Image (cartoon, coloured by chain):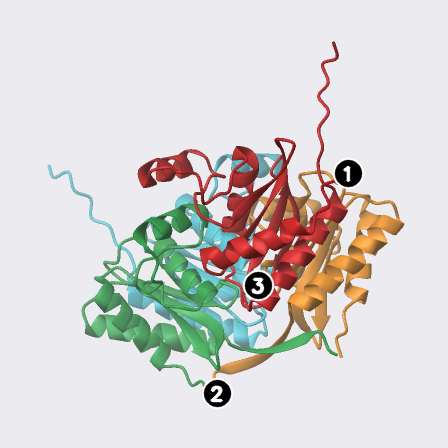
Chain colours: A cyan, B orange, C green, D red
């Protein structure tokens, strides 16, 4: 039996499509956001800091995206007590339990994640969803 | 259409005026403070650590100032639930939700920020306001 | 006399134009690069990690871009003796004397910078130049 | 015999006098510098980043000043082979063998240091000397 595992991931064109789609949604909503896309390994594949977005967004958005990619769940729906979430954040530099990070999942496998920060949590999630909707996963 | 955006900022003389004014107010109040001024990009333009000020002040004051400059609001009035503020502080190296950082805003644009630390929050804010009052923004 | 200084910078649309133009040039040259654009304050405004680019690119490219933005010269043409460049790299977290970072300058003022990493130095610089050429600075 | 050691140091007013004097000299020389003053413990007592100074100056100047304060010699005259200097920089986060940091010494005791960065080494040292000359050590 082969020792190989075949995985799927999205590439540079898909990451840039997600970025464009999310930025356009954020503009439509008047939401000055930072938007980041990471691959399954947590590496930042695409990023935009929109005019008026808070300049600390990169740190936070990268952690939201990595949390979603590494755990395979939205960064804001981890169902952890606040103290546990805080302890995990201190223990794992890339973990943050703040809404706005969404995993991209196909057939049960995480392909990566998109995360958005700078507006209220609800808007951040809508913008992130607009990014994912641009992907053709078939 | 040009890709340029015209912005205003304050320069070295303005930063040193703010520093002088804030230090004088702190002396008047008997408040041994650290006083820092950052530009819109978060770079420290002027700093003084007064006699008797806590020596950890630089780290904290720089974060207060950057928080105010990056988010465009006083560092102590961010209207965040305590847990969210704590999570953001862990996630973003420059973020802190502690009073004493005030943005310098003109026509809706952040020019930079001043922050003060070392006394009680109320005094820190009064000293920071004295720094801003020294600026001629016309 | 006003304490304000008028400056120019580029915004989100300009940063994304630079990113697109540089990525297209890199594809044309078959160069798998990381491409980053920072504003004058060193904040990352746009980023793409192309397929096949080394995953450490973000750290290096961000430092190249900040070096170019902070010093106002190409990161590879700083005319420093090798020992001094090495000492500066150890001393300043954002400094690196590696080619591939180009400042965007207009009327003697730095608006920001673009940096590219992942290929040989000559190609990195050509890709960065393609990014700058997309800007309309008039 | 008492276990106490009496030491002298300079205070906030002296640090701000040194800052002012150094900045004025730098303006006179047309040298856009970062100027920092530390006390004997290496804490930053005063700082100014002049218009046009490289934005990485804070990191480097702080290390030059601490090197001068901790070792009691000018940061550029440590007579170390380049490899030894590089090894020390890697081992000790605050050590850097770059000219521009001068200790303030009285009766054989280090009171603190001033450091300057942003111009050529010779100018940096002249500006630092102007800062020290403002001190009344009698």
The quadrant of the picture occupied by the C terminus of chain A is: bottom left
As helix, strand or loop, the secondary structure at mark 3 comes to loop
Instruction: Judge from the rendering whether residue A10 lies leftward or rightward of residue B9; answer left or right.
Output: left
Residue depicted at x 26% and y 66%: C124
Which residue in the rendered view is the most extreme toward the left?
A1
Residue depicted at x 70% and y 67%: B14
As helix, strand or loop, the secondary structure at mark 2 comes to loop
Q: In the rendered view, would you say B106 is above or below D133?
A: below
For the residue pair A58 and D47, the one nearer the viewer reads as D47
Q: Do the residues labelled 1 and 3 touch (CB within 8 Å)?
A: no
- Mark closer to the chain start, 2 or 1: 2
Residue depicted at x 52% and y 70%: A50
For the residue pair B138 and A91, the one nearer the viewer reads as B138
- Quickly name the residue at label 1: B52
**Marking on residue B41:** 3
Residue D8, picture quadrant: top right
Q: Residue A13, percent across and down? A: 30, 68
Chain where mark 3 sits: B
Q: In the rendered view, would you say B86 is above or below C28?
A: above
Disc 1 from disc 3: Cα separation: 29 Å
Q: In the rendered view, would you say D10 is above or below B47?
A: above
Crowd around label 1: few <14 · some 14–19 · many ≥20 (10 Å):
few
Q: Residue C95, percent across and down? A: 41, 55
Residue depicted at x 74% and y 64%: B17
The quadrant of the picture occupied by the N terminus of chain A is: top left
- Mark closer to the chain start, 2 or 3: 2
- Quickly name the residue at label 2: B2
Count of numbered marks: 3
């Amino acid at each position: 039996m082969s020792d190989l595992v075949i995985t799927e991931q999205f590439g540079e064109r898909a990451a840039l499509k997600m970025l464009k789609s999310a930025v356009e949604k954020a503009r439509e909503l008047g939401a000055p956001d930072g938007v980041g896309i990471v691959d399954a390994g947590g590496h930042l594949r695409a990023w935009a800091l929109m005019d008026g977005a808070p300049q600390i967004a990169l740190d936070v958005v990268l952690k939201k995206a990595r949390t979603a990619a590494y755990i395979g769940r939205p960064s804001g729906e981890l169902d952890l007590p606040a103290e546990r979430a805080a302890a995990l954040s201190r223990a794992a530099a890339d973990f943050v339990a703040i809404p706005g990070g969404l995993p991209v999942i196909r057939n049960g496998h995480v392909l990566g994640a998109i995360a958005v920060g700078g507006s209220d949590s609800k808007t951040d999630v809508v913008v992130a969803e607009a990014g994912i909707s641009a992907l053709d996963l078939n």
